[in-house]
Image (cartoon, rainbow, N blue to C red):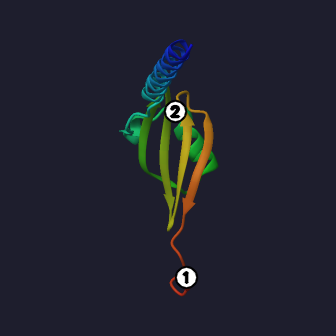
């Protein structure tokens, strides 16, 4: 009886170890398919017309400082950095030129502001 119990415990532990290695393999495979690609620089003249039209309309007075395209999961987005004076905004557009979101504005801190 002890031999049978010992063999069952041995088989169960082998199944558990096999299940753990299978789970790790599928997790690592999933992370490689969702990895982002590096941003590719885009010239302002090469941006889709809807993007330049939107910037001219909604961000009048801003100039395009930098633009890049990012492709992740077969979806292309455009990240456009615009500036006006000392403030900088990063705008995100989809592949067809539709505005998605504003990542954040960067304005320099006032010179007399106290640092914490």
Tell me if residue 78 comes above or below residue 15 in the rendering: below
Q: Nearer the viewer, residue 83 or 90?
A: 90
Distance from Cα at disc 2 to Cα at disc 1: 44 Å
Camera sees residue 105: yes
Q: Is residue 99 left or right of residue 18?
A: right
Camera sees residue 73: no
Dot 2 falls on a residue whose secondary structure is: helix
Dot 2 and dot 1 residues touching (CB under 8 Å): no
The circle on residue 29 is: none
Q: Earlier in the sequence, mark 2 or mark 1?
A: 2
Q: Nearer the viewer, residue 47 or 20?
A: 20
Q: Position of residue 71 (x, y in %)?
A: 45, 30
Q: Which of the 4 quarters of the picture holds residue 38?
A: top left
Which residue is at 52% across, 28% downward?
A: 95
Tell me if residue 116 comes above or below residue 48 in the rendering: below
Dot 1 falls on a residue whose secondary structure is: loop
How many callouts does the rendering have? 2
Quadrant of the snapshot with the C terminus: bottom right
Q: Residues within 10 Å of mark 1 (few under 14, many from 20)?
A: few
Residue that numbered label 1 is attached to: 116
Quadrant of the snapshot with the N terminus: top right
Tell which tag, 2 or 1, sits nearer the viewer.
1
Q: Nearer the viewer, residue 45 or 81?
A: 81
Residue lying farthest to the front in this orientation: 1
The circle on residue 49 is: 2
Q: Residues within 10 Å of mark 2 (few under 14, many from 20)?
A: few
Q: Position of residue 32 (x, y in %)?
A: 42, 27
Which residue is at 62% across, 39% downward?
A: 100
Tell me if residue 27 comes above or below residue 10 in the rendering: below
Q: Position of residue 85 (x, y in %)?
A: 50, 66
């Amino acid at each position: 009886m002890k031999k049978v119990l010992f063999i069952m415990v041995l088989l169960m532990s082998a199944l558990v170890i096999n299940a753990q290695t299978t789970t790790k393999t599928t997790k690592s495979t999933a992370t490689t398919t969702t990895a982002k690609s590096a941003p590719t620089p885009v010239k302002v003249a090469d941006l889709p017309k809807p993007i330049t039209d939107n910037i001219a309309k909604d961000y009048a007075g801003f100039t395009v400082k930098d633009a890049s395209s990012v492709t992740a999961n077969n979806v292309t987005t455009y990240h456009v950095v615009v500036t006006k004076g000392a403030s900088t905004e990063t705008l995100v557009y989809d592949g067809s030129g539709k505005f998605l979101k504003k990542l954040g504005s960067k304005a320099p801190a006032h010179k007399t502001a106290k640092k914490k």
